[in-house]
Amino acid sequence: MKKTAVLAVILLMIGSAAVWADGIDAFSVFKTGIGARALAMGGAFVAVANDATAILWNPAGLAQLDDTRVVGMSTNLYGMGITHQFVGATTSLYDLGIGLSWERASIDGQQVDLEGVPGGAFTWTENAIIGSLAANVMDVAMAGVNVKYYMANSGLGDTASGFGFDLGLLVSLGDTFTIGMNAADLAGSKLTWDGGATDIISGLYKAGFAIALVDGQFILATDVDFVGTDLGDAHIGMEFQLIEEFALRVGVRLTNEFQDSVISIGGGAHVAGLSVDGAYVFNRRLGNTLVLSAEFAFGGPIDGDGPDTEGIETE
């Protein structure tokens, strides 16, 4: 192939290597996380998971929700032109939490030949369609599963696809303490390109706990990542509900064997079922990221009788 698609791939690789301990692999941008609320808390959300973004942080959290919700997010990672978007919907049906969502990452690039002469423009895209299901388990825990269909397009006529699976668990110990675990892309997810080449989306495993104090108005949470059997990043976050309609958040992600840190701050307003959240993530190596997301909760569960759960209260 005389021309090589380099710009988009290089930017995606730089972002992946700097953000995640597992380095460069397929769909690494997706591992930066979704939702301004969770990201403002440094990504410490596996044991909170009490809004619609639980679809990807921990699908077990959907069993906590007793209404119907829609959620959306869009951001330009590091100001580098890497677009990351998410749209989802959740509801409760016969005590089951159900979700359907779409996640997308894209970046514009330019072909460059072997002599370095620029050619035509293209857009590299990665998409995932996610179906989620969650349930209470004997009133002592909540469990959830995601089935994901991945699609990639190089923008130069090459496409790839494959399936992935997530498993999540959430255990509430009274009204204050919650333990969460999530295995994303369990055992690795395989994508096959048209020409027969394959990519692997490496598994990312999270475990953490959250404490809710002052009737749920103050949440302290912490997570740790594992990439296979290797220790990854750690996350610490806090949320404080100043008044019923407004919350402040702060978090930190510890990377590079806890030698480096990424600080995040944010806030959210909640009025009449509509939550609008913002987060600002400070990354000294790549650049800062502004994340905006919104969620709307309306009506009740489809069957009119949602789950009876305890633990961290929803927004």
Image: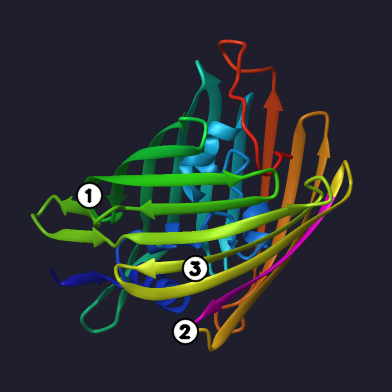
Q: Which residue is mark 1?
A: 159
* Above or below, comparing residue 43 to residue 58 in the picture: below
Q: Is residue 275 above or below residue 13?
A: above
Earlier-in-chain disc, 1 versus 2:
1
Magenta region:
247-257
Residue placed at 29% from the left, 53% from the top?
186
Identify which amino acid the numbered label 2 is placed on.
Asn
**Camera-side residue: 219 or 213?**
213
Q: Which residue is disc 2 drawn over?
A: 256
Could you tell me residue 9's position as x and y percent? 34, 69
Q: Circle 3 is placed at which residue position? A: 224
Helix, strand or loop at disc 2? Answer: loop
Q: Is there any visible trace of residue 309 in the rendered image?
A: yes
Task: Give the amino acid type for the residue marked by disc 3 in the picture.
Answer: Val
Q: Position of residue 64 (x, y in %)?
A: 59, 34
Whether the magenta-drawn stretch holds residue 82 is answered as no
Marked residue nearer the N-terminal end (1 or 3): 1
**Amino acid, disc 1:** Thr
